[in-house]
Image: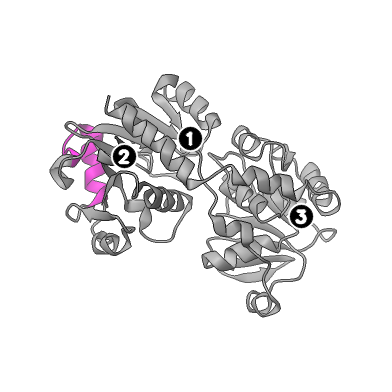
Amino acid sequence: MAADLRVLLDGTPLLGRRTGIGRYTTSLVGELASLVDVRLIGFTTRGWRELRSLAPAGTRAVGPPIPARILRKLWQRGAFPPVELLAGSAQVVHGTNFVLPPSIRAGGVVTVHDLAFLDDPSLAEPDLPELVLSSARRARVVCTPTAAVADAVSARLEVPPEKIVVTPLGVDPEWFSATPMDSDLRVHYGMPSDYLLFVGAEGPRKGLPGLLEAHGPDLPPLVIAGPGEAGSRNGVIRTGYLPDEHLRRLVAGASALVLPSRDEGFGLPALEAMACGTPVVCSDIPALREVTASQAILVPHGDPATLNEALHRALTDPPNAENGRARARTFTWRTCAEATITAYQRATT
């Protein structure tokens, strides 16, 4: 029975600002808590106490303060220290963020979110490729967010397809009832009534340079929500990080959400926008094709002229909003948790 499973998860992504992997880990753990015995370990010294306060209801944090850099160096060389030595026994150990801690008896499961770091080493620490490769080989099961990433992991990391379980991410229910910002909030953030929206970190991987080239005075202002300082310049408004509720309202009020990424493991912002009825323009790449399922306007990556045309189309002839909502409703964190439990059960047999 799944309820009898004792699972130790890497809870380090729960600490600090919630990136995509942080949101995945938080939502997954929240669902797993009612289905299996969940313990969290943080590979950190500074966040050790914080993890104990952040552990979702029904879970608990275990293990001592651990310097991550020293651990990674040790794990590059071998299987010491095994995770049971740090956190006690478990039937399954789940590396939620690319790296699987070595274990003595626990079945290993690792989530590989994407392989962008293989093509752009600047996206990760220098030791990550070696650690991911050894983790994927050591794991009994590798989880990926999409079939597109599963294919890439199988081909590029030489992982047998039968060893991979696809665990699609979910859309929080609050997205389906999100409403645009009221006038007070728009004034607070300096938002115009009409705007295009990009959500995420800046940089080549997410395609922001090409979006800035495609954007022009013939289109509504561009709003960028994500890391960085807030401010406005040349028709581009940067909000910095926003509270979750404000981000949902920002997305709900956008004329279109734009995700012109070079690569994605899943593309959760696209689904979240579809959930609140906002048109989506995104790159025609495998993961986004899979997730949006013809409910977004797809454009070739790196083609600013075509992207400009697609943005105009989103304003004048957007995809059907109700069909987009219906697609988004098929992705839930409970489904993600159930698929992950399937991975755990395979790892213990």
**Which residue in the protein does label 1 denote?**
115
Q: Left or right: where does residue 21 sit relative to residue 191? A: left
The answer to whether the residue labelled 2 contacts the one labelled 3, judged by CB atoms less than 8 Å apart, is no
**Which residue in the protein does label 2 denote?**
94
**Which residue in the protein does label 3 denote?**
215
Q: Is residue 165 above or below residue 71?
A: above
- Badge 1 local density, few (<14 within 10 Å), some, or many (20+)? some
- Whether residue 260 appears in this view of the structure is no
| Alpha carbons under labels 1 and 3: distance apart | 28 Å
Amino acid beneath label 2: His
Q: Nearer the viewer, residue 272 or 112?
A: 272
- Badge 3 local density, few (<14 within 10 Å), some, or many (20+)? many
Q: Residue at x 26, y 48 (%)?
A: 69
Q: Left or right: where does residue 281 sit relative to residue 150? A: right
Magenta includes 127?
no
Which stretch did the figure color magenta?
A: 67-83
